[in-house]
Amino acid sequence: MDTQSMQQKEEVERLIKTCETGKDSVGAFLRSMDDFSAVVEELPAVVRPLVMRDLQVNSGMSADEWKTFLERLGTRYGAIYDEARRVVEGLNEANDGKVADATAALKDASAPLVESADIAADQMQTMEGYLEGLPAKINMIPDSFMSADAREGLINSMPGYVERARALKELLNEAKEVLSSVVAG
Amino acid sequence: MALEPYFSTRVITSGLYYRTVIYVEDSNATISEILANLQSIFSGVESLGKAVEFGDKVAVPIYQFNFGTGGGGGGGGREGQTNNGVAFALGGTIGPIAVVILEKDVPGPGGIHIHEFKANKLGEALAELVLRLWDMVESQMSGRTKLSAEKKEKLMNI
């Protein structure tokens, strides 16, 4: 394998690793959102729509929209991962034709992510900020509106949310950077 | 300015009575305009009471309607003559059930306080009403995060 192919392989392997981490991180965040939704479902009828509405107004998307976006993102990481693996296989086999085909397929699979990575990263940044302020906001809700136990349960239902949102944002930036290099190369 | 009314009727059966909550859609009007229009729209209905502004807070009392209807009919009379009687009656009571306090400078649920005067099963309906009021208040604030339809479309198809 020549130096150029070695360098290409390193970049694609970095992309594969980013996509693997991305899929895992998306899955973890989706589970967190499901847990949060389950806790919200148990809240009093007066509070339930307010919490969901607060998420929508302050994060820019409803819980269902977040779920759709994250599922799409996970699927996108998976598609890029599959094509990147094919590129590596072609490089290992020194099969230029397979490398060219797989690289073209990788370009197609990654186009939506490259195009929307900045918007998605901004959105994750918004979510991170929202989640950071959420415990304090929940604690502001008066007892007559939501019991102390319910407030505590809601806050405790989201450990590590901020870090997961931040990780997803950083992975989006990384994926865009690596993809630019791999697809351009 | 005109405020388009958006009527939604939630009927919670309680014996022969119906409880109705009516609310209005959001608008870009200022709070005072919205409240003025609310008063106008509901002047004949009075599901929302007169809003009182004091400093950075607005208090809006909420009333509950209990409607009862009754009807009756009669037939018969002397031979060869029509003699039908029909009666219809509408009765109801109105009572305050809660007051919503909106803090203009506090975004999110922390800025909304509901004080119910008695326990009742209107929680869900009240929540919907509060959401509308919340929209009105938040439309006056800059804290709302807006995502353009174009960006949202891209995220949904990423």
Image (spheres, coloured by chain):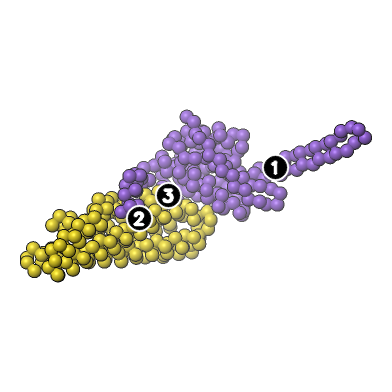
The amino acid type, in three-letter code, at marker 3 is Gly
Q: Secondary structure at mark 3?
A: loop
Q: Secondary structure at mark 2?
A: helix
Residue identifier under label 1:
B92
Residue identifier under label 2:
A69
Tell me if residue B117 comes above or below residue A33 in the rendering: above
The amino acid type, in three-letter code, at marker 2 is Phe
Classify mark 3: residues with Cα within 10 Å, few (<14), some (14-19) or many (20+): many
Horizontally, residue A88 falls left or right of residue A33, namely left
Instruction: Tell which subunit mark 1 falls on.
Output: B
Give me the residue at 45% from left, 48% from top: B111
Residue identifier under label 3:
B108
Give the chain coloured yellow. Answer: A
Alpha carbon separation for disc pair 3 and 1: 36 Å
Q: Is residue A178 visible from the viewing direction of this image?
A: no
Of B84 and A140, nearer the camera is B84
Which mark's residue is nearer the viewer, 2 or 1? 2
Of B114 and A33, nearer the camera is A33
Q: Residue furthest left?
A: A3
Of A40 and A69, nearer the camera is A69
